[in-house]
Amino acid sequence: MRWLLAAIVLVLSVATSAAARAPQISVDEPRAFGYFLGDVLSRRITVRLGAGQELDSASLPRPGPLNYWLEISRVDHAEKSEGDATVHTLDLTYQTFYTPLDPRRLTIPGVKLKLQDDSELTVPEFSFITSPIRQLFASASQSTGSAVDLQADLPAPRLMTGTERTALLVSALSALIGLIGLAWHYAWWPFNKRPARPFTEASRYLRLNAAKLDGVGGYRDALLRLHRAFDVAAGRRVLADDVPSFLGQHPEFERLRSGIERLFVASRRAFFANDVEEARGEMPVSELVALSSELGAAERRAS
Amino acid sequence: MAREEGVLAVRNLQTAELSGWRERALELEKEVGKVIVGQQRVIRLLTIAIFARGHVLLEGDVGVGKTTLLRAAARGLGGAYERVEGTIDLMPADMIYHTYIGEDGRPRVEPGPVIRYGGDLTVFFFNEINRARPQVHSLLLRLMAERSISAFNREYHFPYLLVFADRNRIEREETFELPAAARDRFLMEINIATPAEPEVRRVLAFDPRFHDSDRLIEAVPSGMVDHRELPGVAAAIQRTIETSPDLERYTLDLWQAVRAPDSAGIEIDDVDMQRLVIGGASPRGMSYLLRAARVSAWLDGRNMVVPEDLRAVFFETMAHRIFLSPIYELRRDAIVQELIKQLFARVPAP
């Protein structure tokens, strides 16, 4: 309504004093009552300048404190031309920090705008009524003993996270699929199918338990470990007579032929001739350990 | 009486003599190998059977030398030799009694092929055994298991007897499958295949020496091994060659794995391993297996049985004692071969 009124006045004034070309100023004010501490007031000032008139932009107000209770928090300036005239729109946002003890009228001071020809335009001051937000003497709270009853905090609003969760799942899934594909491509675990290293394992066991394997039972255990390693390497059970064919299939161990043959002779003596002592004399545990580490080394070189 | 002689022989036999016997066994193997070329493994198995005192069934194609091999081995063994042809009209009585009309026109009954030589009968060679009727197979059961027979109201004992039989696998018409009980009494069932090596094939086809099998067999010196001492030697071998607790455990593992192949992790294509084996691998079979394995160890010059010995004789001593579910019987050969191959590939030794 006020806009309409201002427009009519403007149109009338333009119509009646078009020849004067005097700068015209109109202010669109906010309501003049019902403000509290920290509230914001917006004023829109419209300045219509005739041809040849120009606003001195240095005279525009700047954001910042005006006095101890008022602050300009924001200044928006826009300009557009309408025919010969130029229309400046100035949006001023004020914030009041006044703490009134009773409803009170305060005044925002007027603004002086300068034109290039040193003439001044005055934006009128604006007064509004501000009120306290609490009673002057608060009744003492029985529970806290405080003079002021603080309002309870608002409960934190719940954030809607469904979209984010779905997005997280989708991206995690696609990352996983990508990782699996990459692992497959580069033959990482578990797609590596790296051949087992039975001799390396047997060698590790023998080396770590060399002291424990010195007895009769331990010697048998050591031989069994080596037998199982041969079995795994060959993919079948390797008996003493199979040693040549085993070496034919695994030429990497050919260098150790004599040691392997001695091992099988000792094993045959220990297991099938009931003569563990003699077998230990023939090939003591230390030699088993040495042979197993050589086998392990040969196996690692080959793979 | 003959049995007592055997026991005495065992007592008297020294280890040194055993090694002498081993020389003779290898000699016999070599001489037979000159007659039957390209079959070293079969000849070795036959030698094992002879020294394990076990009966042998040979099978294979026609004309691969089954009969020649058995005749050559019988000649090397010496002792009385009898041969019977399996025919569809052969009856048990024909093997025991010989009936004819005498010159004076009276019917006569005389001992037939089995009892003609009495206790001295060493090799009883049954040719084409699957052509004989089941009645004849039943007669063989007792002859093989107990080495004795009843005739003329008395018992005949054959302490040196070895039954060699052969059959061909090609023909099925007018033949009778051997009952399981009879097959179980053979120590080994040996399959003879045509030699694969080109050189052996060339010699067999072109060398005139192999054209006349009678003269060929005469090349084997007769009686290289004294058949009367064989039971004693065989018992001494069984007593001398040792088996360790580990080998016993291994043998029992093998036995268990044959009876329950799925528990040993054996897998054969298109075969439900839980239903495959329905029986067999009898205790007698296992004792035969150990007998043969001991002889194999002895022939290799060892005084202990090792897993290789079991493996060398396992197929021939055990394959025919494994009874499969009927739906797998038609594919029997392939399945049993794969079963035993995997058995030795999977059961850990020692």
Image (cartoon, coloured by chain):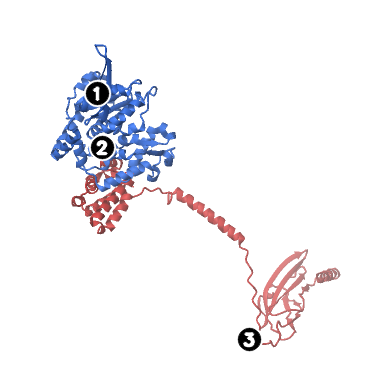
Chain colours: A red, B blue
Residue at image mark 1: B82
Which residue does the image show at 25% across and 56% down from the upper left?
A213
Q: Is residue B215 above or below residue B321?
A: above
Which amino acid, mark 2? Ala
Counting from the top left corner in percent of width and height, residue B240 is at: 19, 42
Labels 2 and 3 positioned on one and the same chain:
no
Residue B202 visible at all: no
Q: Nearer the viewer, mark 2 or mark 1?
A: 1
Residue B1 x, y percent position in the rendering: 18, 33
User: On the picture, is B220 further left or further right than A250?
Assistant: left
Q: Which kind of residue does numbered mark 3 sit on?
A: Ser
| Point 34% across, 24% down: residue | B132
User: Within 10 angstroms of label 2, few (less than 14), some, or many (20 or more) residues?
Assistant: many
Foreground disc of the pair 2, 3? 2
**Residue name at image x 80 percent, y 72 percent:** A22
For label 2, the residue is: B292
Specify the label residue A146 is tagged with.
3
